[in-house]
């Protein structure tokens, strides 16, 4: 028989997998918990009861899915957008943005069944949104109540590869609205809105006539000319014979412009031109090809045969609108599919993954997000297709020190081949891992990207490793794989106060991972939100988003689905402050709740969203008997000036099996008895402790001198209690808080006897 006094000094390994029950050979066993429910682990080591959620409002239509998307202009101007069935609303500071008494609402094309596949990126007051079924759009905020969503007007691209067949396109005009005719079936009715690169210009399909004919609006070129081919009339043009010695050999004849406007007008090498109005009929060429050009000299192909002629006549030079096989069709359309991923990288807007080009990435012109003019200049747009032996559909783009590309078959990085900004001539793409990514937007934590693996059960950390000079992707769920078994469907990072990655699971549960890589803190914790849905005794969480909030804390918003009065309700809620301070009146531990603050009252109304529900109450900082909401109100047993009312929830922490006190090796599987436990607490009121959830004793905090309806001061220090547990081989310790009160556990120090024989 041996006595021992071990200490559970921290919980930074979080809730551990049942598969680790025998791994006492790893340190994280002693820093982990068997159960960690409705607790948040701090990087310091302790675990605090999570705060409750504050009710904002019911979504527009509880019958449909809803998704929350953060819109952050800066830390002071941050909003939560409620995306529902073909609309979004705006929420800020725990309320809804209204105009003339009604919620500000913007119409969108996104059906409620499409919301999960939306990806987004933001620059200042403009957010770009993509979805494979819809043209990319941008949300613009011009004031607190002025919001718009419009289709992105792409300029000069991006385009698919140039045509390599014998099919030709011909436009019947060079400006305005033109008809484009194809020599073979080329167009589809879904091409309306699609760009066409033709005759050294650009056009956008406005209407579909047939597979060989569409009407299109001519677009501006990079130099601001809205024409498919140039046409220039001047009296400053002179013609020069290329064979003045009359040898009979073909030479490059030329046209000169004393005004020097050839390049300005848009003439380029390879363009076919026609000339009219020359004084000498021989100079009125048709189909001549430009082989070299400067501002004042146009050199024609050897087959051209000009006659010397001085300037003076009004001469017109026009680019020919001939049947042209050198055309390209836009990469984004209802025919090809629209991009499914988007981000900003090195002053470029980057799209990726259309239906027809699932492995292709499209980079805008540097500093001009909607301009996709391609070329070889350092700022020109570029298009890159991942090369691999299988189709790797791009799932996400994430900008960091490099551009990370998550695909269904592996993870890639895009960077430059030299220490310079990315350009069309130095782009390099390399595969880093082969795990495959789910179609879920990742989160960026400092210089690390956390992404969900293809099967949705694992969260991986994509981080650069100096030892291997490559990116590694260790599994963050390895020690707690049971938590995410149902699959992750959404994530968000709450950076302040404790750097928690929140995950919404397919089964409706809500889990968090306290993540501090530099301190080796990876702690999973599970959260059951108050209320119920269907046959589950907990409410389902369907979406999560975070924005900066007050008190240096990020605000975490949720869409919570409950059964209320036999009907399905979807509510927008957000967590109260995690670090509420040292005032018991600010301690808020009810879900979907509201707070009354005012003159003394016994009837509290405004609880219609909890009609028929049994609610937990804290009045003037003290616990109050539960009540049932009737006609949207409750009646207190005594008057109060500060009341928190909402759905109750329980926080439970269960330690791993104790391994201490054995004189002959381990104490695991040996009979032991815990006879006393000391809990080191921080800002706590009310604790239950015992050997299991069915055998718990409540630790007294209130003395006989304290009035039952008065608030207790928050307790910080040690609570020593006799432990009501018998002899067993496990040695579990369970700590629970079921009251709507705060509790932070810094350490657990049991005293026990172990029997080696």
Image (cartoon, rainbow, N blue to C red):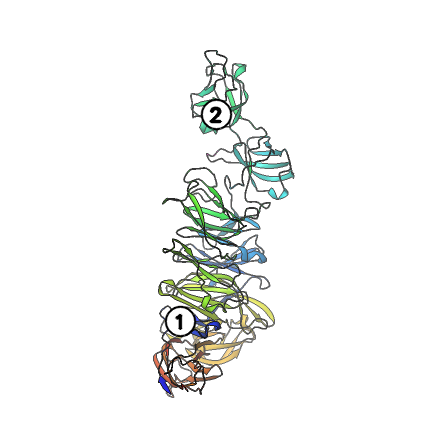
Q: Is residue 728 above or below residue 353?
A: below
Residue corresponding to mark 1: 26
Residue corresponding to mark 2: 291
Q: Is residue 385 visible?
A: yes
Q: Residues within 10 Å of mark 2 (few under 14, many from 20)?
A: some
In this view, the residue in front, 99 or 23, is 23
Q: Residue furthest top?
A: 246
Residue 634: percent from the left, percent from the top?
52, 77
Residue 198 in which image quadrant: top right
Residue 97: percent from the left, percent from the top?
48, 59
Q: Residue at x 55, y 57 (%)?
A: 115
Image quarter where the N terminus lies is: bottom left
Q: Residue at x 46, y 43 (%)?
A: 364
C-alpha gap between disc 2 and disc 1: 74 Å
Q: Residue at x 47, y 47 (%)?
A: 350
Q: Which stretch is magenta?
A: 220-224
Instruction: Answer whether residue 263 is magenta in the image.
Output: no
Q: Is residue 558 visible?
A: no
Q: Is residue 719 left or right of residue 150?
A: left
């Amino acid at each position: 028989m041996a006595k021992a006094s071990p200490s559970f000094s921290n919980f930074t390994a979080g809730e551990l997998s049942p598969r680790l029950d025998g791994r006492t050979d790893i340190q994280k066993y002693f820093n982990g918990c068997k159960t960690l429910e409705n607790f948040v682990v701090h990087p310091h080591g302790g675990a605090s009861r999570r705060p409750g959620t504050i009710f904002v409002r019911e979504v527009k239509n509880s019958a449909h899915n809803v998704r929350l998307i953060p819109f952050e202009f800066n830390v002071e101007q941050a909003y939560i957008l409620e995306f529902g069935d073909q609309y979004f609303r705006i929420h800020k500071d725990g309320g809804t943005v209204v105009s003339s008494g009604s919620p500000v609402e913007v119409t969108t094309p996104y059906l409620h069944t499409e919301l999960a596949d939306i990806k987004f990126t933001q620059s200042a007051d403009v957010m770009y949104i993509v979805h494979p079924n819809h043209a990319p759009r941008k949300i613009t905020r011009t004031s607190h109540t002025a919001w718009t969503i419009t289709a992105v007007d792409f300029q000069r691209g991006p385009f698919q590869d140039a045509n390599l067949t014998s099919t030709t396109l011909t436009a019947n005009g060079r400006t305005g609205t033109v008809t484009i005719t194809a020599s073979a079936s080329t167009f589809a009715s879904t091409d309306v809105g699609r760009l066409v690169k033709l005759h050294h210009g650009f056009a956008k399909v406005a209407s579909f006539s047939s597979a060989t004919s569409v009407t299109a609006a001519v677009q501006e070129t990079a130099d601001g000319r809205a024409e498919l081919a140039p046409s220039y009339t001047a009296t400053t043009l002179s013609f020069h014979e290329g064979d003045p010695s009359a040898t009979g050999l073909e030479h490059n004849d030329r046209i000169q412009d004393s005004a020097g406007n050839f390049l300005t007008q848009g003439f380029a090498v390879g363009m076919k031109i026609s000339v009219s109005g020359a004084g000498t009929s021989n100079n009125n060429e048709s189909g001549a090809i430009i082989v070299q050009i400067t501002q004042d000299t146009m050199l024609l192909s050897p087959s051209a045969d000009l006659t010397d002629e001085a300037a003076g006549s009004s001469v017109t030079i026009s680019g020919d609108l001939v049947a042209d096989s050198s055309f390209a069709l836009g990469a984004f359309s209802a025919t090809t599919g629209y991009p499914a991923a988007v981000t900003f990288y090195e002053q470029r807007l980057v799209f990726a993954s259309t239906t027809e080009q699932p492995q292709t990435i499209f980079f805008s012109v540097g500093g001009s997000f909607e301009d996709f003019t391609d070329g070889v200049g350092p700022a020109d747009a570029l298009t890159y297709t991942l090369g691999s032996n299988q189709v790797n559909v791009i799932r996400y783009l994430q900008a960091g020190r490099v551009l990370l590309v998550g695909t269904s078959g592996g993870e890639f990085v895009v960077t430059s081949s030299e220490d310079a900004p990315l350009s069309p001539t130095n782009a390099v793409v390399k595969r880093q891992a082969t795990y495959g990514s789910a179609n879920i937007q990742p989160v960026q934590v400092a210089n690390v990207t956390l992404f969900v693996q293809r099967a949705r059960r694992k969260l991986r950390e994509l981080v650069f490793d100096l030892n291997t000079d490559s990116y590694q992707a260790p599994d963050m769920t390895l020690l707690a794989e049971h938590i995410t078994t149902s699959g992750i469907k959404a994530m968000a990072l709450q950076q302040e106060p404790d750097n928690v990655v929140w995950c919404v699971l397919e089964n409706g549960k809500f889990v968090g991972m306290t993540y501090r890589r530099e301190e080796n803190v990876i702690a999973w914790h599970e959260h059951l939100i108050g209320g119920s849905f269907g046959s589950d005794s907990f409410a389902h969480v369907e979406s999560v988003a975070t924005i900066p909030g007050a008190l240096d804390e990020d605000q975490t918003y949720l869409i919570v689905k409950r059964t209320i009065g036999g009907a399905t309700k979807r509510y927008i809620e957000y967590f109260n402050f995690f670090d509420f301070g040292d005032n018991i009146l600010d301690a808020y531990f009810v879900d979907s709740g509201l707070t009354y603050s005012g003159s003394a009252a016994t009837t509290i109304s405004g609880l219609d969203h909890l009609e028929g529900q049994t609610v937990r109450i804290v009045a003037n900082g003290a616990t109050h008997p539960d009540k049932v909401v009737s006609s949207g109100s409750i009646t207190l047993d005594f008057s109060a000036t500060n009341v928190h009312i909402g759905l109750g929830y329980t926080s439970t922490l269960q330690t791993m099996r104790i391994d201490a006190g054995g004189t002959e090796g381990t104490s695991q599987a040996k009979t032991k008895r815990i006879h006393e436990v000391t809990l080191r607490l921080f800002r706590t009121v009310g604790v239950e402790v015992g050997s299991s959830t069915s055998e718990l004793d409540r630790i007294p905090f209130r003395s006989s001198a304290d009035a039952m309806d008065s608030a207790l001061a928050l307790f910080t220090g040690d609570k020593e209690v006799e432990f009501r547990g018998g002899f067993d081989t496990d040695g579990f310790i369970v700590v629970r808080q079921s009251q709507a009160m705060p509790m932070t556990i810094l350490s657990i120090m049991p005293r026990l006897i172990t029997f080696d024989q």
